[in-house]
Amino acid sequence: MAEPKEDDFLDDIDAAEADEYAEEMAEIDEEELELDQLRAERDQYKDRFMRALADAENARKRSDKDRREAENYGGSKLARDMLPVYDNLKRALEAATDEQREVSGPLLEGVELTMRELLNVFKKHGIEVIAPEVGDRFDPQHHQAMFEAPVPGTKAGDIIQVAAEGFMLHDRLLRPAQVGVSSTPAG
């Protein structure tokens, strides 16, 4: 029988240490792998959370904007329906002659007061009158050309008649001013 060599004993210790080291490394690799998976899962949940947070913030901003628009422009249909009332009161006051003013003074005064009150309500709700004058330049952003005619002494694009005043609701056009516009004068 062969005698065990002293080196065999050391080889056995080295092999045992190597096996133990390999087992520890395998265990560490499994833990690292599990830790990497947990980190990836954490990052995925963090990403989802950040996206949900951004969505919630965007929804809040959108609802604030919608609420402000509803406050400012929610009554635009009613305001648009009140414009003929303004037009009729204005026509009634313009049509009254001096003789009618003497006879029906209190009645016309009541119409004037009603007109003033209507303008105060318009102002309170952000409705402004667009009142172009004859000779002003035509602005397609605020005016609607009802007709075009060559008029001596005017330039093309000058307002020659105002048929109806226009109105703005805050920064939006509620109704354009209806005007007649000068074309290039016949010469």
Image: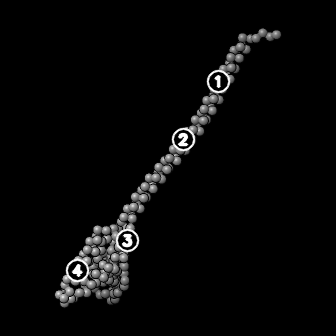
Closer-to-camera residue (142/31): 31
- Give left or right: position of 12 versus 2: left
Mark nearer the N terminus (1 vs 4) = 1
**Which label sits on residue 21?**
1
Compared to residue 128, the image places residue 6 above or below, namely above
Compared to residue 20, the image places residue 149 above or below, namely below
| Residue that numbered label 4 is attached to | 110
Spatial CA span between label 3 and label 4: 27 Å
Mark nearer the N terminus (3 vs 4) = 3
- Which quadrant does the N terminus fall into? top right
Mark nearer the N terminus (3 vs 1) = 1
Spatial CA span between label 1 and label 2: 31 Å
Inspect the image, locate mark 1, and give the three-letter code of the amino acid beneath it: Tyr
At numbered mark 1, what does the secondary structure look like: helix, strand or loop? helix
- Residue found 31% across the figure and 87% down from its top: 151
- Which is in the foreground here, disc 1 or disc 2? 2
- Which is in the foreground here, disc 1 or disc 4? 4
| Residue that numbered label 2 is attached to | 42
- Residue found 39% across the figure and 61% down from its top: 67
At numbered mark 4, what does the secondary structure look like: helix, strand or loop? helix
- Regarding residue 104, the answer to whether it shows in the image is yes
Compared to residue 3, the image places residue 162 above or below, namely below
Spatial CA span between label 2 and label 3: 50 Å
Inspect the image, locate mark 3, and give the three-letter code of the amino acid beneath it: Ser
At numbered mark 2, what does the secondary structure look like: helix, strand or loop? helix
Closer-to-camera residue (114/186): 114
| Residue that numbered label 3 is attached to | 76
